[in-house]
Image: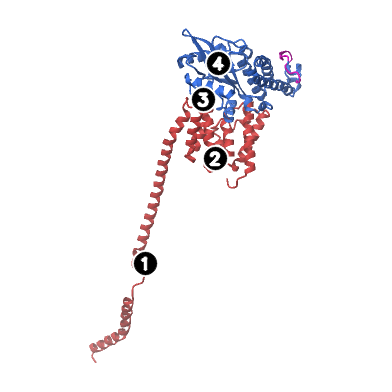
């Protein structure tokens, strides 16, 4: 046998050795190809293959974008609502401040302001600073709010009362105590008790004890009026002890 | 019968043209003062004043007269820090129903001692106004407030018709600025000063008022129709006398060196001594 024949024979043997293996592999591949495609998520994931991470990223961006848009829309809508409240309330607040307005008209306007709920608390508290009919009207409005939106009253009024900015005079502080009682703000009890303590000190002759609460010290008669309202409010709240307020 | 007469007089008043609409408009004194008297705009008939402007001229004159205390009887309270506020457009309801507890408390908190309101009328004779008449209402704020012990049992609103047996005038200013007004101002200042623990001023005013009111009481007792009013004044005087006694007792509670002279010299049982009118 020549050298060429020998090489040929070796190659044929080699091919013979590979043949069944190659054949098996091809058969397996064909079987897989013949199987029906997977269904559901697995099928989808299999179908997406390497594009899946890109898809997930896009979806996250879309979701976050929509969320941001919703909150921006909400904020804009809230702003628009606030603006419309201001416009609507302005008319009534102007009516309250009119120099020739009778008490009936002032009280009516204040109760209409109160109908706006929480946004009405601050404008009405502000009216307390002016005394006279405006303070009387504001108290009527705040009393209405105490029945309609006690949570709003219990949330905002104590903050104004305790503010170191001393926004209210003694009369405003006194009215606030009555309003807190009307709204059953049991959480305001410690605040009112602290005011009672300071007033009692002032009555006993400690001249500057009220300076953390009011700019101008009230007269003896006014201190007694304020103390009376405070004690009545404390008594009401101690009786009711509304839970969760 | 009384009610019918009242309705008829009210109807007549409206028929002849009352010029002001009842409304409790806010009012401020010309300057801050410890005590304030609210002088509200009166209602009036066309025979009293043909135009509102004319009434306002009278109103200004009256306010100035009272605020500057030109009156000799008003001069008795000259040393007291009080002002008369001109309350234009403030027209309380003639029966005083505007003065709810909240309104009275608000007035009290602002140092308002008395509010005056009412109706003015007159006759015309040859184009001139003659025989002026007035129905004046007095709200004694510290009495109506009812926080000084005993005040809740005493009438806090008084309504008088002028002229009467003693108060006669040809001019509205003299008719309104009368001794009843001065006595009521002294009364209300006295009660408010007592609540404010200024016992010296309280005692002085309460005794002064008690003395002045004894004249009013006697005058009103003369006529059968004003007898109930006289009894109201009598109740008020008894209350004032009692309060003057309490003022002495309270003033004596101070350390002995700080006890004022009046509290040393007078007794709570006989608190006004020389000023006291015979019973």
Where does residue A6 sit, x and y in percent of width and height? 26, 89
Magenta stretch, residue numbers: B268-278
Q: Dots 3 and 2: beta carbons under 8 Å?
A: no
Identify the residue under disc 1: A45
Q: Which mark is residue B134?
A: 4
State whether residue B123 is above or below residue A47.
above
Where does residue B53 sit, x and y in percent of width and height? 45, 15
**Marks 3/2 same chain:** no
Q: Residue at x 45, y 33 (%)?
A: A92
Foreground residue, A131 or A194? A131
Colour given to chain B in the rendered image: blue
Q: CA distance from mark 3 to mark 2?
A: 25 Å
Q: Dots 4 and 2: beta carbons under 8 Å?
A: no
Q: Residues within 10 Å of mark 4 (few under 14, many from 20)?
A: many
Foreground residue, A74 or B178? B178
**Marks 3/1 same chain:** no
Mark 2 lies on a secondary structure that is: helix
Identify the residue under disc 3: B26
Q: Residues within 10 Å of mark 2 (few under 14, many from 20)?
A: many
Colour given to chain A in the rendered image: red
């Amino acid at each position: 046998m020549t050298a060429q024949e020998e090489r040929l024979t070796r190659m044929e043997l080699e091919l013979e050795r590979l043949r069944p293996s190659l054949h098996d592999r091809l058969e397996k591949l064909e079987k897989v190809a013949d199987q029906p495609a997977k269904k559901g998520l697995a099928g989808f994931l299999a179908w997406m293959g390497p594009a899946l991470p890109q898809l997930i990223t896009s979806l996250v961006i879309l979701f976050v974008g929509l969320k941001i848009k919703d909150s921006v829309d909400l904020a804009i809508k809230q702003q628009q609502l606030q603006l419309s409240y201001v416009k609507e309330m302005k008319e009534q607040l102007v009516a309250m401040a009119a120099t020739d307005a009778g008490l009936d008209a002032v009280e009516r306007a204040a109760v209409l302001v109160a109908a706006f709920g929480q946004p009405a608390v601050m404008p009405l508290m502000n009216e307390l600073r002016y005394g006279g009919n405006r303070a009387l009207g504001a108290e009527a409005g705040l009393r209405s709010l105490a029945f309609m939106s006690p949570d709003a009253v219990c949330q905002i009024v104590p903050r104004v009362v305790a503010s170191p900015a001393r926004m209210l005079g003694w009369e405003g502080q006194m009215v606030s105590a009555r309003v807190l009682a009307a709204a059953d703000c049991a959480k305001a009890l410690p605040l009112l008790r602290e005011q009672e303590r300071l007033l009692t000190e002032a009555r006993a002759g400690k001249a500057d004890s009220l300076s953390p609460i009011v700019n101008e010290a009230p007269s003896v008669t006014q201190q007694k009026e304020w103390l009376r309202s405070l004690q009545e409010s404390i008594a009401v709240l101690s009786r009711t002890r509304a839970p969760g307020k | 019968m009384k009610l019918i007469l009242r309705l008829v007089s009210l109807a007549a008043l409206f028929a002849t043209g009352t010029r002001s609409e009842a409304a409790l408009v806010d009012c401020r004194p010309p300057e801050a003062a410890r005590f304030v008297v609210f002088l509200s705009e009166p209602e009036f008939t066309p025979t009293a004043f043909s135009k509102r402007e004319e009434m306002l001229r009278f109103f200004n004159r009256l306010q100035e007269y009272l605020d500057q205390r030109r009156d000799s009887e008003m001069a008795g309270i000259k040393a007291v820090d009080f002002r008369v506020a001109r309350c234009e457009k403030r027209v309380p309801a003639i029966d005083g129903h505007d003065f709810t507890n909240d309104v009275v408390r608000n007035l009290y908190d602002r140092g308002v001692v008395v509010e005056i309101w009412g109706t003015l009328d007159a006759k015309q004779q040859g184009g001139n106004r003659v025989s002026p008449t007035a129905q004046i209402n007095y709200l004694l704020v510290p009495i109506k407030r009812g926080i000084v012990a005993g005040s809740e049992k005493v009438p806090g609103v008084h309504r008088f018709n002028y002229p009467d047996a003693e108060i006669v005038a040809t001019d509205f200013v003299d008719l309104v600025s009368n001794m009843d007004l001065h006595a009521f101002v002294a009364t209300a200042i006295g009660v408010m000063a007592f609540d404010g623990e200024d016992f010296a001023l309280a005692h002085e005013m309460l005794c002064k008022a008690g003395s002045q009111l004894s004249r009013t009481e006697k005058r009103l007792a003369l006529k059968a129709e004003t007898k109930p009013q006289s009894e109201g004044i009598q109740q008020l005087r008894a209350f004032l006398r009692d309060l003057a006694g309490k003022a002495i007792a309270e003033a004596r509670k101070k350390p002995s060196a700080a006890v004022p002279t009046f509290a040393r010299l007078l007794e709570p049982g006989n608190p006004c001594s020389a000023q006291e009118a015979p019973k």
